């Protein structure tokens, strides 16, 4: 699998992963922190939003390649900088670190829809996995917090990307299959809601 991810793409993924983790860490530590807590929140960000972002993009890539297209993630340096600066100055994360570019002529509506659905689909699967971690670990421990934020972040990634607007995945999925669109967007928003009503959630 790794041989299908060129060195340049790996570098782009790692840089985007780290930048997003830094942006979310800055949100967590606004108002001051200690070195220990800085490391704690950076690790939390790496293993929740970071992993969620990487797997979401790789899902697009490998499904596209299953259809015979070449696909690579390309970071957007300007948007990565915006994400970090906004987090530091305004306490807001607007994470659009780049996109998976698919190289091919005349990609069909069905193929395009399936490729688009793969990202939110894997985000939903990750959210469910983190839900299990949240449910089986002691309250207020690092794994418990990892489970809660991992579920919330991945559900939010899925819900946002399933909005049927602009270049987001939802528009492509809706153009391919209304039923799949409804299932994915409803599941994503239901999971987002669940992260706020689960016992112990905040």
Image: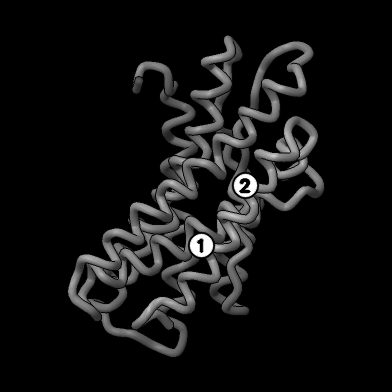
Q: Nearer the viewer, mark 2 or mark 1?
A: 2
- The vertical placement of 116 against 69, above or below, is below
Q: Are marks 2 and 1 in contact (CB under 8 Å)?
A: no
Q: Residues within 10 Å of mark 1 (few under 14, many from 20)?
A: many
Residue 89 point in image, percent of width and height: 60, 78
Q: Residues within 10 Å of mark 2 (few under 14, many from 20)?
A: few
- The vertical placement of 140 against 14, above or below, is below
Lateral position of residue 166 relative to residue 38, left or right: right
Q: Indicate the quadrant where residue 55 lies.
A: top left
Lateral position of residue 58 relative to residue 68, left or right: left
Q: Indicate the quadrant where residue 1 lies.
A: top left
Residue 81 point in image, percent of width and height: 59, 57
Secondary structure under tag 1 reads helix
Q: Which residue is mark 2?
A: 183
Which residue is rendered at x = 48% and y = 70% of the image?
A: 194
Q: The C terminus is located in which quarter?
A: bottom left
Residue 147 point in image, percent of width and height: 32, 64
Front residue of 71/63: it is 63
Front residue of 50/177: it is 177
Secondary structure under tag 2 reads helix
Which residue is rendered at x = 23% and y = 79% of the image?
A: 139
Q: Along the polypeptide, which appears first: circle 2 or circle 1? A: 2
Which residue is rendered at x = 40% and y = 67% of the image?
A: 149
Residue 12 numbered mark, or none: none
Residue 168 point in image, percent of width and height: 72, 45
Front residue of 154/39: it is 154
Which residue is rendered at x = 23% and y = 71% of the image?
A: 142
How many angstroms separate mark 2 from mark 1 (CA)?
Answer: 12 Å
Q: Which residue is mark 1?
A: 191
- The vertical placement of 123 against 101, above or below, is below
């Amino acid at each position: 699998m790794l041989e299908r991810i060129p060195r340049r793409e790996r570098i782009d993924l790692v840089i985007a992963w780290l930048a997003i983790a830094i942006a979310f860490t800055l949100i967590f530590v606004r108002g001051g922190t200690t070195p220990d807590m800085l490391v704690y929140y950076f690790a939390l960000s790496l293993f929740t939003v970071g992993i969620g972002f990487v797997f979401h993009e790789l899902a697009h890539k490998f499904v596209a390649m299953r259809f015979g297209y070449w696909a690579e993630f390309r970071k957007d340096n300007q948007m990565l900088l915006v994400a970090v600066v906004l987090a530091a100055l305004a306490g807001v994360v607007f994470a659009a670190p780049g996109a998976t570019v698919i190289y091919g002529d005349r990609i069909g509506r069905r193929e395009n829809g399936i490729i688009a659905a793969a990202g939110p689909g894997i985000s939903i699967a990750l959210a469910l996995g983190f839900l299990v971690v949240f449910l089986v670990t002691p309250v207020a421990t690092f794994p418990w917090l990892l489970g809660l934020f991992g579920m919330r972040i991945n559900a939010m990634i899925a819900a946002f990307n399933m909005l049927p607007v602009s270049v987001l995945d939802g528009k492509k999925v809706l153009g391919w299959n209304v039923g799949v669109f409804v299932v994915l967007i409803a599941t994503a928003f239901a999971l987002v809601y669940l992260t706020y009503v689960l016992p112990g959630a905040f």
